Amino acid sequence: MVGNIQSHFKIVISGINLSSDFIMNDTPHGNHVCDVNCKVGERGTVVITGIINGEDKNENFLIAEDLKEYFIKLFSLFGVSCRIKEFEIDTTTDFLTGHIEVSPPKPVVDGSKINAQTGKVASQYLDPQKSALYHNLVESNNSIDMLHRFRSLFSVFDSLSPKNAQGHIDYHALKTGYATEIAVRYQGAFIGRYIDIVDEFCNANLEDVRANKNYSSLLKNSKQRLGNSSLIDEEVAFNLLKCIQIIRNKVNHGDFSGLNRKIVSGAYELLLPMVQKMLCA
């Protein structure tokens, strides 16, 4: 079996009337996947479990994504209205262990705001580039897996963000708008939730190795300078966005040091308001 890092996966698919448990004899990435068991689940479901052995956690996640697609195609040959009800992948000491509910504040929206966007959303059916943006937005809302949701959301953010002379995201150009959006979105009962996420970032040791800057420390310092006068200013906003960028870079490279599920969920949650603002602009 190839690989050094072992992950256990579980996928539940509905719409299947399976008569008895069985062992699956073939899958994609066969040299990385073993012990694939299919069991009769509750209410017309099949519960698929197995083991992935890859070079790192990121590779295991990508293999699991392929397996999801493979299993839904396979069982659609025999079921009715098949869909994935549950997906879990767990690695020893991995940040994917455990479940964190993502319930960011929902903005109040009226019909005039929605109608202002109908033409834009309708036009994306004729524009492949815009269509890809909305596809990733939907993926970031619907995917069961938080890693995929965060990646999809950041890809939209990256596509819409202004770039500097080096071709990188210009966070200085975004910090004012981001500070405003977070201040508007996180009020009342959600203030504690925002503070909790920021504290997680401050303790995560999120370092930009190339720039030799630790943005967890910079965020903590900027937060202390702000004091209790406000939740966020431009400096805090800038450092928050840089922390989210570093989290994305670490996830993409399979480097989960200093990360946990709460940090990745928090990065997704704090990025969502800005992406929605940019898409509606």
Image: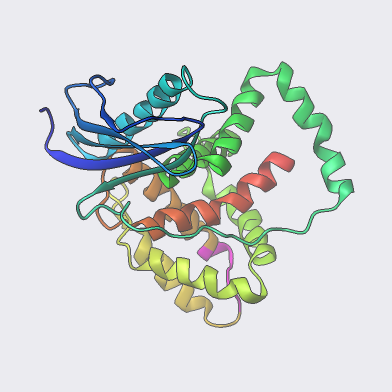
Q: Quadrant of residue 40?
A: top left
Q: Taking 127 as reference, is 223 above or below it?
A: below
Q: Quadrant of residue 194?
A: bottom right
Left or right of 110 on screen, residue 220: left
Q: Which residue is rendered at x = 40% and y = 58% of the image?
A: 99
Instruction: List x then y, in percent, for residue 19.
Output: 38, 30
Query: Which quadrant of the figure contains the C terminus?
Result: top right
| Residue sitting nearer the eye, 82 or 152 | 82
Q: Taking 232 as reference, is 103 above or below it?
A: above
Range shown magenta: 230-236
Asked whether residue 233 is drawn in magenta, I would say: yes
| Residue sitting nearer the eye, 33 or 162 | 33
Furthest-bottom residue in view?
228
Furthest-front residue in view?
19
- Report how many numbered discs are placed on residues in the image: 0
Query: Which quadrant of the figure contains the N terminus?
Result: top left
Instruction: List x then y, in percent, for residue 17.
Output: 46, 30
Q: Quadrant of residue 123?
A: top right
Instruction: List x then y, in percent, for residue 26.
Output: 25, 19
Q: Which residue is rendered at x = 36% and y = 26% of the image?
A: 66
Q: Which residue is rendered at x = 45% and y = 37% of the image?
A: 45
Instruction: List x then y, in percent, for residue 78.
Output: 46, 20
